[in-house]
Amino acid sequence: MISLKKSLDEIGRYNDLFRAALECFIAALRDTEEHALPVHRELWSRHQNRLQNLRTGIPEQPSPADLYGASLALSTELKRYSEESAGHLSRREEDFREILVLLAKAAGEMNANANACGLQFQNFAKKLEDLSRCDDLHQIRQGLRVEVGAMRDSAQTVQSENRAAVSRMEAELRGLQARLRQVEELAATDALTNIPNRREGERLLAQRIADGDPFSIVVIDLDYFKKVNDKWGHLCGDEVLRIFAKSLQTQLAARDVVCRWGGDEFLAILSCPLEQAEARASQMVERCGGEYLIPLRLREIKVLVAASAGVAAHQPGESCEHLVARADEILYNQKNERALSMGKQSA
């Protein structure tokens, strides 16, 4: 009897281990899907869709073959994305190299024109020197007329060539600047919500600290977001995040900014003191929450969205990490207090 109980306990323990390992594997898939570097928007979107299909395709009660297959598919997809991204970056590098070569060529043409113009001036000076030794005034006048005309034509030619070279250089520079802006925007934008990503948020926080002006931050976390994903799927969860992010942006003042900090967490930087930031955070949570209508599989579903916020004002000499940690602690203390309060009410 004891042996049977021990065996059942052992089976239960192994079952718990298996469920925990499965949840960790699926969570790792979700993190890989979410945090993949968006080298190129189209490549990144295809990569996300493949990872999402892989994750949602794992059965509720997977067999070892299912998990081995998912692991192999993940490895294949990561390798494919790595190769596609490397190819895109290589082509982008070639584009930049080509632009730099063209700029160097245009600069070389201008330099060559300048050198040619210098030689022509030297020749002009020599001919003037020769004319100065002539005694015939008519011959001097005729010679000057010829040389001045030649110099005028030469100057116009050089001017036209330089203008063309400068125009080409300006066009190439504009193209290079446009491509650089595109790369910078892609690197600073969260591809799902189209607002600044965490990397850009950290940069903006560091800039605010360096500027020395007082500011506050609000860490905002969606309540029970996992239940939305579990019940309706991640496509629905993604749409909730997009709508919530767009709604948050409408609550910002001129110098404020909001970024997606990770998962269902957002961070807003507000140019105001703590008391005012706390009042605005309450407004944000209230106005951005509510009932969302989400289009899903040719129908609309109603999703109730709520959020919590932790607010902290930057203190002189405080680092970004410490500031965010303080706001996070306030946020999760509030969540825990609310959970305890709801537990007592239900009891």
Image (spheres, helix red, strand yellow):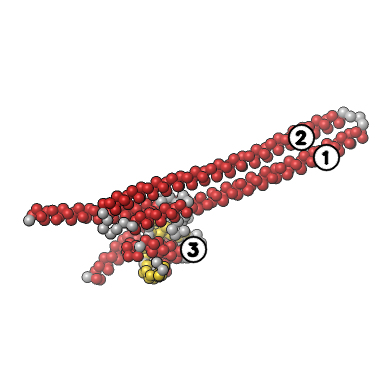
Question: Whole-Å distance between the Cαs marked 1 and 3?
Answer: 64 Å
Please tell me in which quadrant of the rendered image residue 58 appears.
bottom left
> Which one is in front, 193 or 319?
193
Tell me the kind of residue under disc 3: Ala
Q: Nearer the viewer, mark 1 or mark 3?
A: 1
Residue beneath disc 1: 149
Report the side of 260 relative to 112 (left or right): left
In the rendered image, is residue 192 in sight?
Answer: yes
Q: Is residue 282 visible?
A: no
Q: Quadrant of residue 19?
A: bottom left
Q: Position of residue 98 (x, y in %)?
A: 57, 42
- Look at label 2 and name its amino acid: Gln
Query: Residue 238: x percent and y percent?
Result: 40, 61
Nearest to N terminus: mark 2 or mark 3 = 2
Which SS class for mark 1? Answer: helix
Residue displayed at 45% across by 64% down:
246
What is the spatial separation of the Cα atoms under label 2 and label 1, in whole angstroms? 12 Å
Q: Which mark is first along the chain, 3 or 1? A: 1
At x 34%, y 60%, the residue is 331
Tell me which amino acid carries mark 1.
Answer: Gly
